[in-house]
Image: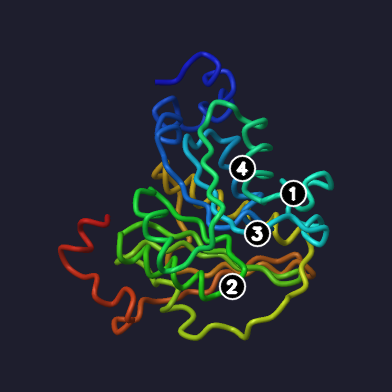
Amino acid sequence: MLNENEKERYHRQIMLFGEAGQEKLKTARVVIAGAGGLGCPVATYLAVAGVGYLRIIDHDTVERTNLNRQILHWEKDIGLPKTGSAGEKLMAINPDIEIETVRITIDEETAPGLVRDADAIVDAMDNYPARYLLNHLACKFGIPLFHGAIRGFDGQATTIIPGKTACLSCIFPKAPPKEIFPVIGVTSGMIGMIQANEVLKYILGTGKLLGNRLLIWDGLGSSLETIQVERDPYCTECGHIKGSQMEKLK
């Protein structure tokens, strides 16, 4: 149930989806993998929307080069763990929700225990090995994965519902070359907000998700387009999810 403070805080969105919808947000558990350029806006907008439990995972510390795009980290936070920096700001933004911060590297040993109890996983990573691991676990546990990636003025996003939509391996069978890529903060904000919007729609059960569609943002041209994508029936990650398994994941 919502308390009086929550009813007042979320009044303008309760007008959209009622107290029942707000209670869905309150009881949701979302894992945000990464507290950087994408993770900061995702976490901020899920927090202000009232998603009741956010687990933020990152192993890194704040550097000055992060500050052009990682909006939860400030000059005073340089040298501190990103999880602690982000957690402090999010609790100040909304003390009515629970924030768990986990300073750890996402790998095959640590990741399963960090995501298996989630209602949704947000891919806010900056490297494809970690993205593919999250995709593998999303398919294994039947948890939706909300992917975003950025480079320069460009970005992309898609929503993966295991067994129902193309997974990350279907869309990108091979990872792009590893690089230190240029990026401007507004691109992180744009894609991060799209990811957060997808998470909220999924929890609320409203709108049309980006399943089987890859959204492409061209910041220099100020244009958005979506590319239709399809499941690969022979995909090693999701191709085995069929029949009764798909029904369970609906």
Q: Which residue is mark 4?
A: 45
Residues at marks 2 and 4, CA–CA distance in whole angstroms: 23 Å
Q: Amino acid at mark 4?
A: Tyr
Judge the density around disc 2: few (<14), some (14-19), many (≥20) Cα neighbours within 10 Å: some
Looking at this view, is 178 or 210 the one in front?
A: 178
Q: Is residue 63 left or right of residue 244?
A: right
Q: Which residue is mark 2?
A: 127
Q: Amino acid at mark 2?
A: Asn
Q: Which residue is mark 3?
A: 60
Circle nearer the N terminus (1, 2): 1
Q: Residue at x 43, y 78 (%)?
A: 169
Judge the density around disc 4: few (<14), some (14-19), many (≥20) Cα neighbours within 10 Å: some
Q: Which corner quadrant of the image does residue 241 belong to?
A: bottom left
Q: Amino acid at mark 1?
A: Ile
Residues at marks 3 and 1, CA–CA distance in whole angstroms: 15 Å
Circle nearer the N terminus (2, 3): 3
Q: Is residue 71 left or right of residue 123?
A: right
Q: Which residue is mark 1?
A: 71
